[in-house]
Image: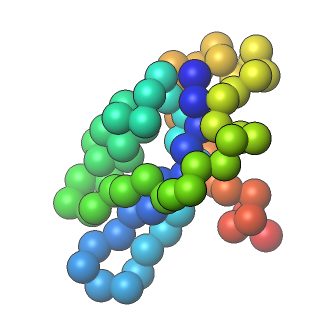
Amino acid sequence: MIRVLIEIGNSSRARSKLLVRAESIRQAVSVVEFLYPGLEARVVFPIEPETFFIKDMAALEEFAGVEMPQSLAG
């Protein structure tokens, strides 16, 4: 299980960022595209190695999920 930051938005400058847990980067993008149809989803690079692999066993119980990034949570 991995965690990546994905930016979503449309052609305007309004964009949001989400932390997504999934089995792969491709699956993470697919989950976001499913949840937000019509919006562009892209992985934010560089990927942070400290948070990329999920080591918390409780977090691994879920197949995939979306989290609010701590930097945006306030």
Q: Position of residue 9 (x, y in %)?
A: 35, 69
Q: Residue furthest bottom?
A: 13
Q: Give the left or right position of residue 64, taking residue 51 as reference.
A: left
Does residue 64 appear in the picture of this structure? Answer: yes
Quadrant occupied by the N terminus:
top right
Q: Quadrant of residue 38?
A: bottom left
Q: Is residue 39 above or below residue 57?
A: below
Q: Quadrant of residue 50?
A: top right
Total numbered labels placed on residues in the image: 0
Q: Is residue 59 above or below residue 41?
A: above
Q: Give the left or right position of residue 50, taking residue 33 as reference.
A: right
Color style of the picture: rainbow
Q: Quadrant of residue 25?
A: top left
Q: Residue drawn 74% across and 65% down?
A: 71
Q: Residue drawn 35% across and 35% down?
A: 26
Q: Position of residue 55 (x, y in %)?
A: 76, 22
Q: Is residue 36 above or below residue 23?
A: below
Q: Residue drawn 65% across and 17% down?
A: 60
Q: Position of residue 13 (x, y in %)?
A: 37, 85
Q: Residue furthest left?
A: 38
Q: Residue drawn 39% across and 63% down?
A: 8
Q: Give the left or right position of residue 23, taking residue 26 as reference.
A: right
Quadrant occupied by the C terminus:
bottom right
Nearest to the observer: residue 7 or residue 62: 7
Does residue 31 appear in the picture of this structure? Answer: no
Nearest to the observer: residue 17 or residue 54: 54
